[in-house]
Image (cartoon, rainbow, N blue to C red):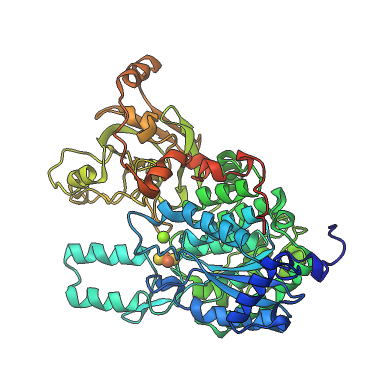
Amino acid sequence: MTRDRRKTPEELRSARWFAPDDLRSFGHRSRAMQMGLGEEDWQGKPVIAIINTWSDLSPCHHHLRDRAEWVKRGVLQAGGLPVEMPVHSFSEQFLKPTSMLYRNMGALEVEETLRAHPIDGAVLMGGCDKSTPALVMGAVSAGLPFIFLPAGPMLRGNFRGRPVGSGTDVWKFWDERRAGTIGREEWEGLQGGIARSYGTCMTMGTASTMMSIAEAWGLTLPGASSIPAPDSGHKRMAAACGRRIVEMVWEDLTPDRIMTPASTRNAATVAMATGCSTNAVIHLIAMARRAGIALTLDELDAIGRETPVIANIRPSGKEYLMEDFFYAGGLPALMKELGERLDLSALTVNGRMLGENIAPARNWNTDVIRRLANPVWHEGSLAVLRGNLAPDGAVIKPAAMDRRFLRHAGPAIVADSYAEMKRIIDDPDYPMTPDHVLILRNAGPQGGPGMPEWGMIPMPKALLKQGCRDMLRISDARMSGTSYGACVLHVAPEAYVGGPLALVRNGDVVEIDVPARRLELRISDEELAARRAVWTPPAPRYGRGYGWMYVRHIEQADKGCDFDFLRTDFGPPVPEPEI
Ligand code: FES
Ligand code: MG
């Protein structure tokens, strides 16, 4: 059908299941009746999946079982049939070895859940780190109209009367505990005060970054990404999503109309302006590629160079947390500050242009959401490095590191595993200077496996003793969005598949030049080739199961760590199921 007219009830995808006068449809209708539904529930009505990442082991999504009811209310108000569909819950804190191992599994589950059922449109509920990209990747590949409903950040943490932030402040207090300046009682007080409500981490970590990206891309209703999870406005937003998705089905407002090169650029620009998590790089690329947009590391670097960080939210900002950001006007106010740096004509899920959506926004606190003339950092939060050590790229967060390591050269100390690195950093007498460069390898997409957040290698005791608080660290791992330090991450290709990181030896001189975007190993091409010739790949880690499939199909960090067979350009489109 063309898109300048509304769908007719006969054209609903779900009508293929419910409408025909045949044996199979009899089965669908009789089984719907088994659940207490009647003809007036499905006839001529869009069936809306509420994709729910709730679970009893997902504290960030613990309110989503309730919020599903509010989405249902909205769907019913607008004349649709809501159906709640549970999927994997992406619990960042509890999933091991790392939730990243399961992002693509979740995306695959979402895609097939939507495709295989009588669904016309979907509301996706999530927010904890990998859940946003997983939900969006799956839904984009399924191609049905959808709205993303962010889980929303939790309330500010509180400890001894002061606000404390997820991640960042925990590490700060842990250092105090190790230094003996706070005792067990205080530490346990922090334990009860750091996560006071349901909702995602309330720093600008991966969760807040990804929810903001979804809104900037046009995939949420205006303002949805900043509403704290316990705020009553979150329930109203849930109902509004329910109402709007029904209309989106009639309008056939599919994701390919929203996720365009222009809106993708908006998403990346907003990410940089928020002082985003380094994880955003991987997820942005993966989501864009699902939408058929070949976003590259170099484009992200270019956007980073010209976009100032204006969200004064920890860890890039010094002071504030997501609750403050919401009170200051939230993401619409931040986007309004960015103004013409965004393509304001980009279409969003409410059927309006981004510019129309943010026109009413106000910035109520210009210390929380800075003016462009008074940014937290003058450049965006991320930089992409290349060189003989990272031919396919690596990522660093210059805004959150000691300036002295922006240009640096020093001898390498190499660890093949995190356990080996732990022995090095826990040895108070390990021979090293602040100029040394720690290298952790075999922690990438295949080597980790799943690219765990080990990239912020803790400062070695041998240097802490000398009063050092930062040093150059290089790995093929990721780091938490709430982390900081001179940490080069996502080195591609990773060591486990024979990337140059695998060939570094103790004492080799490593050179970094962030302004020039260079990362080099000071050895000759001949020497590198000679080492490569004798390199042997590590033994396979999995003999069966999901991990076995994962290592065969996972792509490198610069490509977004998707499975090759889930890439949009891998083959022809998946056909609609036969009914
Ligand atoms: Fe869920 Fe941080 S643990 S967002
Ligand atoms: Mg995180």
Q: Where is residue 68 in the image (x, y as percent from the top left)?
A: 56, 78
Place residue 576 in its image quadrant: bottom right
Question: Residue 15 versus residue 257: which sits nearer the camera?
Answer: 15
Residue positioned 38% across, 42% down in the render: 444
Q: Looking at the image, is 554 positioned above or below residue 410?
A: below
Q: Where is residue 556 in the image (x, y as percent from the top left)?
A: 47, 39
* Tally of marks: 0
Q: Position of residue 406 (x, y in %)?
A: 42, 41
Quarter holding ligand 2: bottom left
Q: Where is residue 332 in the image (x, y as percent from the top left)?
A: 65, 68
Residue positioned 53% across, 61% down in the render: 132
Residue positioned 24% across, 62% down in the render: 175
Q: Looking at the image, is 261 positioned above or below residue 524?
A: below
Residue 375 appears in the figure: no
Locate the C terminus by quadrant. bottom right
Locate the N terminus by quadrant. bottom right
193 relative to 214 in the view: left or right = left
Quick one: which residue is furthest to the right in this view?
A: 4
